[in-house]
Amino acid sequence: MAFCLFAVLAALGAQQGYCALVINEFMADNDATVTDPEGKYEDWIEIYNTGDFSISLEGYYLSDDLENPAQWTFPAATIPAGGYLCIWADDDEGDEGIHTNFKLSKSGEAIILSAPDESILDQVIFGAQETDVSTGRYPNGTGEFVKLVPSFGAENSELAASIGDIDGNGSVEMEDAILALQIMAGMDTGSVIYSGSGVDGDGGIGLQEALFILSSILGFDGVTYITLNNTSVAVDGEGATVDGAIVTISAGGTYSITGTLNDGRIIVDSNDSVAVNIVLNGVSVTCSTTAPFFVSNAEKTIIELAENTENYFVDTNNYVFEEGEDEPDAPVFSKDDLTIRGSGLLNVDANYNDAIKSKDGLVIENGVFVVNSLDDGIQGKDYLNIQGGVFTVNADGDGLKSTEDEDPDLGYITISGGNFTIVSGNDCIQAETDVNITGGAFNLTAGGGSNATIGDDDSAKGIKAVVEINIDAGNFIINTADDAVHSDQDIAITGGDFSIATGDDGVHSDSKITIDGGAFAITKCYEGMESTVITINDGNFHITASDDGLNVAGGADSSGGGMWPDTSNNFLHINGGYIVVDADGDGIDVNGSFYMSGGTVLVNGPEENGNGALDYDTKFVLTGGYLIAAGSAGMAQAPTYQDTTQYSVLYRNRNINRSAGTLIHVQDTSGNAIFTFAPSKNYQSVCFSMPALSHGASYDLYFEGSSTGATTDGLYEGGTYTPGTKYQTFTISNIVTNIN
């Protein structure tokens, strides 16, 4: 089935006026165009009523998720006939105005408008967006989606500047060439230079633009046009030759290719120092013996995916190699550096091995990609650099991959944006050195997901690196049979939203994990986080584990068992953040030393006495923060006396097993609440520490009862506590007070 890049899908519903509504304009990178009622520059979507009657939008849906069109429901709002409604897509529903529960990605994604019966009225799938340039229908309400000067709540009437139209007057002329040369010479032209008017995408104006404009004015463009005619090829221009159904590009320059080629090939074999720029302008190529697109030799090859086009490459399951060779072995294969950009679609079906593969570096600036592969989906040997785009990858092997393992400066993956849906038999993202992510939306499923079973030697991880993983931002939905995020050495996370379900560890490093921010909802795992050293400075964590919530242990993945006799270099540091653990094993297990100076930690479990809510080998030094850990009594521990400066209390009673949800309440002798907490598991012990506990002060410990306060993760705030059973009055007389 064809994948429509800019699809407008209308469906008649039961209510009159359904089809009169269209997505008319949107902006996914609003830096200085228009502010919401809060004064913030946010993403926005404009709906236009093309009909003759007003339409109530209450109960309609808007979404950026193709698999969940009913993601956000319109409140009471009416669009008059011929009217506009602008919605802020900023995930700030509580702000003044109409705000969705999702944001738009400037790297590209989808927008879907649906009727109350969930039938799709209109949708658009878009690629990377320019800052302060909107995308909308032109002519207004009915035309194709094009780049616009933003009109926000009004008629779409002005196109954004096109390539070469430097002064933005709608035409490419000699004045534009003169402007380009003046700018290159450093002269002050006094003219406004329009976004999008550059030629080479580097953001500057100069000789390239001047030459392009002059070529346009003189009537020649220097482009070689290649037309594919099923079993033959026609070439208009220089630099390409034809042999039957094979076209070979042998010189640098620009080549525009269109048409269908059955059992043929596009080959690049150029010794020029000039890059080969190939514009795919609606191409479909199949080959029954080898790679349909093959870069044998070139200084650099650039594939441009022309706007509003769909391009397909399909290989065979039975490659025929030259003697002594085992390459090419992918439908899109390059021996040299390869760059892919543009806003069109590239659909690659690999029936033999990998799908898109470069033996040097692979850069993807943007585009829409649908990849189905018998082995790896997208691979750059030296590096894989993805800056934007929409990716749907189904791979029996790895989804995204970099394979250089001999040069420590190569073999990395860098992702700065994009929308990724990856289903892989092995790892979704795998690098031989580093994985660096600074943005993007990721839906990753590996090895059949968290309920699947894989072999001992198999790897089915979400994000995997041999050296380092660095994540600064992004939205991650990860469902894996193996670790969700895994590094053989270090992991550093400073931000991002993570929703994780895994058959093994949520975040695992053989050396060091450092968390400086982010939100982690680990709903299923063996161990939530595991490493030799874990440092948490900030972030929000909700961890449900079948074994330990946080586990500090030396060496490689401990999921398979084993002991670590030397724990002197094993550390857990909690300096901040909000951490909630629900564990069947140890809540926090430190095979070494535990230091806590800040943050909030709430531990629920375990229920059986072979584990403890807090389990450490060497020492637990507590100097600050808020801690409540409820679990079994058999291995219950509290902070150590040495170096600990904040007072704590350990209650334990093996003879009373209190049910999950039974309140623990501590108040001072004047009745002021210290805390009220309802553990989510059965418990026999509670260790608690917070700054409110004072030396020499007395407190009352209650169980059961009820509270009218607001509860978050079992911890009550405000309200009135109705006493249950008073267990004991105790006095803080030492750094650790025991209630037995």
Image: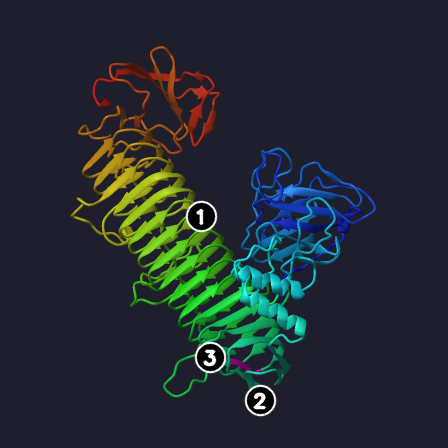
Can residue 713 be seen here? The reply is yes
Name the dominant secondary structure of the magenta segment: strand
Q: Is residue 226 covered in magenta?
A: no
Work out which quarter of the rendered image holds the N terminus and state it: bottom right
Closest to the observer, 514 or 727: 514
Q: Which residues are magenta?
A: 263-267
Tell me which residue sits at (30%, 35%) in the image: 613
Relative image position of residue 548 (x, y in whole percent): 31, 43
Query: Label 1 crowding class (10 Å Cα cut-off): few <14, some 14-19, many 20+?
Result: many
Q: How is the image coloured?
A: rainbow
Q: Earlier in the sequence, mark 1 or mark 2?
A: 2
Q: Which mark is residue 177?
A: none
Q: List the residue tagged with mark 2.
A: 244
Closest to the observer, 471 or 728: 471
Circle count = 3
Q: Amino acid at mark 1?
A: Ala
Measured along the vertical axis of the image, is residue 577 above or below residue 426? above
Q: Earlier in the sequence, mark 1 or mark 3?
A: 3
Q: Amino acid at mark 2?
A: Gly
Relative image position of residue 56 (x, y in whole percent): 75, 40
Work out which quarter of the rendered image holds the C terminus and state it: top left
Measured along the vertical axis of the image, is residue 438 above or below residue 696? below
Q: Earlier in the sequence, mark 2 or mark 3?
A: 2
Q: List the residue tagged with mark 1.
A: 473
Q: List the residue tagged with mark 3.
A: 272
Can residue 119 be seen here? The reply is no
Relative image position of residue 514 (x, y in whole percent): 32, 45
Viewer-nearest of labels 1 and 3?
3
Helix, strand or loop at mark 3? loop
- Marks 1/2: CA distance? 50 Å
